[in-house]
């Protein structure tokens, strides 16, 4: 959240009346809390959506099918597809290293 000089100036003017200042601070705190909740919900929704896309990719759906059928953004699906491929390659190499005799 960005506090502008005008907001600070208004709060200083209101500080002459303690009750008004406290009410203004409470409103501002409520506004910040609500913005934080909305941001948290958006992040949670994105994470849930990414899990769904990963499951679709693992089940064999192509990125093109996911984009067409579910309206997902190409950049998101491609990023998750690449991330899945990179993790699979890493895990495969890691497993092979453990199996090979030292």
Image (tube, rainbow, N blue to C red):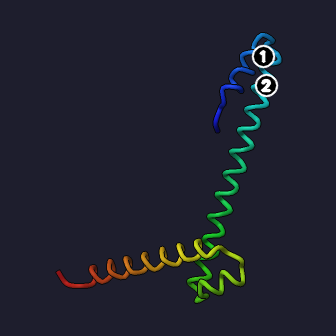
Q: In which quarter of the view is residue 28 placed?
A: top right
Q: Can you say whether 49 is above or below 44 in the image?
A: below
Q: In which quarter of the view is residue 95 placed?
A: bottom left
Q: 71 and 51: which one is in front? A: 71
Q: Quadrant of the C terminus?
A: bottom left
Mark number displayed over residue 75: none
Q: Earlier in the sequence, mark 2 or mark 1?
A: 1
Q: Look at 58% across and 89% down and name the residue there.
A: 60
- Residue 17: give x, y in percent of width and height: 81, 12
Asked whether the beta carbons under mark 2 and mark 1 sit within 8 Å of each other, the answer is yes
Number of numbered markers? 2
- Give the CA distance from mark 2 to mark 1: 8 Å
Q: 74 and 21: which one is in front? A: 74
Mark number displayed over residue 24: 2
Residue farthest toward the top in the current orientation of the protein:
16
Which structural element holds mark 1? helix
**Residue under label 1:** 14
Q: Look at 70% across and 55% down and name the residue there.
A: 41
Q: Look at 71% across and 77% down and name the residue there.
A: 71
- Residue 18: give x, y in percent of width and height: 79, 13
Does residue 88 appear to the left or right of 28 in the view shown? left
Graded by Cα atoms within 10 Å as few (under 14), some (14 to 19) or many (20 or more), the crowding at tag 2 reads some
Residue farthest toward the front in the current orientation of the protein:
6
Graded by Cα atoms within 10 Å as few (under 14), some (14 to 19) or many (20 or more), the crowding at tag 1 reads some
């Amino acid at each position: 959240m960005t506090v502008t000089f005008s907001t600070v100036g208004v709060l200083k003017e209101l500080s002459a009346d303690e009750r008004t200042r406290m009410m203004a601070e409470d409103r501002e705190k409520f506004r910040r809390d609500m913005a934080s909740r909305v941001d948290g919900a958006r992040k949670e929704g994105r994470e849930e959506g990414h899990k769904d896309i990963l499951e679709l990719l693992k089940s064999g759906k192509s990125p093109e099918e996911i984009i067409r059928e579910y309206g997902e953004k190409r950049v998101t699906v491609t990023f998750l597809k690449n991330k899945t491929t990179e993790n699979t390659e890493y895990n495969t190499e890691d497993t092979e290293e453990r199996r090979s005799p030292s």
